[in-house]
Image (cartoon, rainbow, N blue to C red):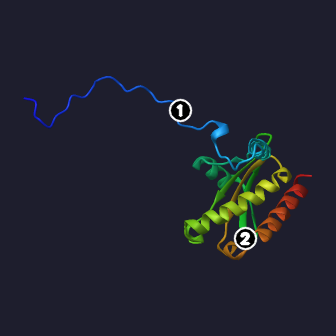
Amino acid sequence: MGGKDEEDISAQRPQEKEDARLSEKDEHEGRTGDHQEEKAQGQKRAHRLSLMRTIRKKGDFQEVLCFGRTRRYRNFLVTYLEGGTGEAAFGFSLSRKLGGSVVRNRMRRRLKEAVRIHEDEFPPGRYVFTVRRRARESDFRELEEELVRFCGEIGKEEG
């Protein structure tokens, strides 16, 4: 029944090895002890960035787009519903007509960063940004200027 090629294999589990990670003292000889301090500073810096509320559900997008007011700018349209919770929520819509995924993601990152920088200037409400094709040729500064202009106009409306 048992062939010559077969071995007896133990049914017991092998003993678990110690954690493969190196202790801090063995980590890297060239690294100074300051790396832990730098790491802690980086974590603090990351926590200071505010987490922007985003609109993600299709129904929320449709509600803003159907019942909201729209403002048109050279690089994007902003449709917004004022009021709601105590903070602003943002959604970003980029059509495939804008370009491939690399182009769309680049534009989304630029616009999100501009919104994040000026997040405090938005009154409470929900905002959906629809990026236009001509935004591909615009740089970050132009997007930011239009966003600041929108914040100023909506602030005047509210006040």
| Mark linked to residue 39 | none
Q: At x 71% / y 57%, what residue is drawn?
A: 112
Crowd class of label 1 (few under 14; some 14 to 19; many from 20; radius 10 Å) = few
Which residue matches tag 1?
19
Upstream in sequence: badge 1 or badge 2: 1
> Furthest-right residue in view?
159
Secondary structure type for disc 1: loop
Percent position (x, y) of residue 151?
84, 58
Q: Nearer the viewer, residue 50 or 27?
A: 27
Horizontal relation, residue 4 to residue 157: left or right: left
Crowd class of label 2 (few under 14; some 14 to 19; many from 20; radius 10 Å) = some
Type of amino acid under label 1:
Asp
Q: At x 83% / y 67%, what residue is drawn?
A: 145
Which residue matches tag 2?
75
Q: At x 71% / y 67%, what residue is drawn?
A: 76
> Furthest-left residue in view?
1
